[in-house]
Amino acid sequence: MSHDNHASGASHGSMKQYTIGFILSIILTILPFGMVMSGGFSRTLLLSVVGITAIIQILVQLIFFLHMNSSEEQRWNVIAFIYTILTIAILLIGSVWVMNYLHYNMMI
């Protein structure tokens, strides 16, 4: 029984891509961890670095491990991912807006 992983149309990365992704993930994890543990940085700088490295970490995971790119075979996966992000953003922003509105009206 032979298993052909490429027959399903899924793109798989090479060892080089996985190694680059792994090294970038390690760097993007150690950098903010080291800054927080050293304690010599301002709170604003720490929050900025943690936030920026978290966003870059997500992109590294999506590109190097989930193989999301602009190719034809990944188009629906990217569209589904964008839809999910937009739905979560609408829920979060809407919830904060409603809670702020209720808080304002309760104080009057």
Image: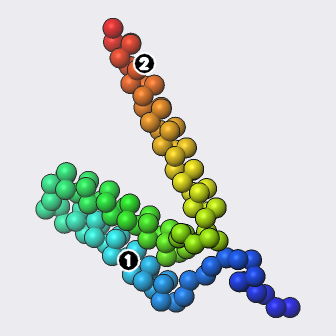
- Establish if 44 lies above or below 21: above
In the picture, residue 23 is in which quadrant? bottom left
Q: Which color scheme is applied?
A: rainbow
Residue found 61% across the figure and 56% down from its top: 80
For residue 55, side relative to residue 63 (left or right): left
Does residue 37 appear in this view?
no
Residue 38 is tagged as: none
For the N terminus, give its image quadrant: bottom right
Front position in the image: 78 or 53: 78
In the picture, residue 29 is in which quadrant? bottom left
In the picture, residue 6 is in which quadrant? bottom right
Residue found 44% across the figure and 79% down from its top: 21
Q: Earlier in the sequence, mark 2 or mark 1?
A: 1
For residue 38, side relative to residue 106 (left or right): left
Residue count near mark 1 (Cα–Cα under 10 Å), binned few <14, some 14–19, many ≥20:
some
Q: Residue furthest right?
A: 1
Residue 42 placement (x, y as % from top left):
15, 54
Residue 19 placement (x, y as % from top left):
45, 86
Identified by mark 2, the residue type is: Leu
Residue found 49% across the figure and 76% down from its top: 64
Q: Which residue lies furthest to the top in this view?
A: 108
Badge 1 element: helix
Residue 33 placement (x, y as % from top left):
29, 66
Q: Name the residue under label 1.
A: 24
Front position in the image: 84 or 40: 84
- Establish if 59 lies above or below 85: below
Residue found 56% across the figure and 83% down from its top: 13
Does residue 86 appear in this view?
yes
Residue count near mark 2 (Cα–Cα under 10 Å), binned few <14, some 14–19, many ≥20:
few
Identified by mark 1, the residue type is: Leu
Residue 102 is tagged as: 2
Tell me the distance, in whole angstroms, between the alpha carbons under discs 2 and 1.
43 Å
